[in-house]
Image: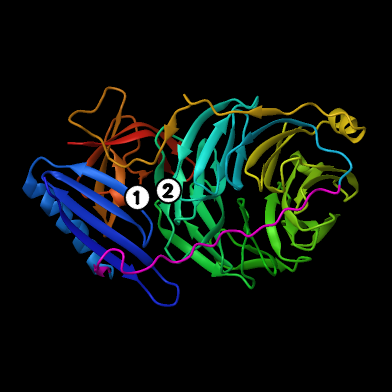
Amino acid sequence: MAGETTYLELSQDGGGAHKFYEVTVAGTAVTVRYGRIGAAGQVQSSSFPTVEKARAAAAKKVGEKVRKGYAPAVAGQRAARAVTRREVTSAPSTARAVAPVLWRFATGSSAFGIHVDEDRCWVGNQAGHVHTLGHDGEVLARYQLPAGVKCLVADDFWIYAGCDDGTVYDLSSKLPFAAYEIASDVDIFWLDIREGVLDVADRNGGLTVIDHEDEHQWSRRSSGDHAWMVRRDEHAVYHGHARGVTAYAPDGSGELWHTPTSGSVLFGWQEDHAVYAGTNRRVVQRLSKATGAVEATYQCDTVVYSCATAPGGRYVFAGDSASSVYCFAADGTRLWKLGTGSGSALSMQYLNEKLYMVTTDGSLVCVDASEAAVSAAQAGSVPVPVDVKSAAAVPTYTPTRTLATVSAAPATGVVVECVQEAGRLRVHVVSEGYDPGWNVQFPRHIREAGARYVIDALSPAAGGFYRVRGEIRRLV
């Protein structure tokens, strides 16, 4: 059956919104496609009992967008806006020895995103691929996202990928979904998230803070552009950019301190009492979270692309633009410098005497960072790295394109309902055993007043809301 399609665009001058919204009705099915102009966008489909109800739902969606400034347009007439991709160079290492690499996995494209926890390793690359691996290098799963992955961040159990299409995807369930939709004029450079509150650093030096309902809380414009660092704790949000690091109160009430750094900040890390900024002037600087004072400087030989620490800052690691990795003592004493063997490290993380790096050649590299292994490497004795291959049978997951429907909730499912509250759509739990006053963190683009959904499981989060765990289906 041929569908009836309405295509809308919202494009503003001066670098503002540049996005589209398309609704297609085919019988009792309604399909919504949305995203940045020029991109394929995200797709969500719903079914309705009758054709009349499907058309009414589509008309409601179109009306909501028109009231927000969208207007009818012809697809393809407006060009896509360019997305900033980090321009990096990588020279051969000048180190005499190569790091003791245990294993490496080639993702196929330059990689920025990394997260490592006790269970597994995550790596995301510029092609939009995210792989999960065991600590032995075994590839466990693969995700295909619509755009390049800028970074991977964790918030307790939940893993999020910030992508070039301005969307932050939740990868915690089998099927990823768009958890946060950043404004089209925000060119994501880096993310952090804590207790469901998302912090976004962007190309223009902006900082945008979004709550668990995917609603804007506050924003600030720091003094420098190209903000490649944002870290958050209960006391502040730490924003690193071309003119240094600025700390803001978590509620957005004001600036707490600003510290000029030696060069533009290209990466940031945090410990309980300090933040670490890697810069284009060959240093990592440790700043006090309380005052912003520079407490130590770690001198490298070329531009610093990434940094990380052992717990408590006992060791500080840095990756430079010449394919080398460094280790420093807490006071700034350089302990060693070794070649990565796989390009320059664009992000890194330390866990249990191993240093994990993602590099310019697209590799996820696992280095034995124990004292014994490094001493042996400096003497010229290194293990033969295992080159990990991705098995053809590894499952591949893509963001949900069709919202499945069920006529009855399974015994183990949780039923939630979308309701209007003070002019906004909220989602509350209907099933027994949950607090009906708590909101559910739920994708905004599939909310529809009066609709009920079934979720595999919910988990309570600090701050008094529930998070989705598992698949979302529409209850009809």
The image quadrant that residue 434 belongs to is: top left
Q: Nearer the viewer, residue 79 or 334?
A: 79
User: Which residue type does callout 2 highlight?
Assistant: Pro
| Residue, disc 1 | 42
Secondary structure of the residue carrying tag 2 is loop
Please give the name of the residue rendered at 62% of the width and 63% of the height, measured from the top-left corner: 227
Q: Residue at x 91, y 48 (%)?
A: 333
Location of mark 2 (residue)? 146
Please provide the residue range marked out in magenta. 70-94
What amino acid does circle 1 point to?
Gln
397 relative position to 115: left or right? left
Residue found farthest to the top = 411
Quadrant that contains the C terminus: top left
Q: Residue at x 81, y 57 (%)?
A: 302
Q: Secondary structure at mark 1?
A: strand
Per the image, is 87 magenta? yes
Residue 306 picture location, percent across and down: 71, 51
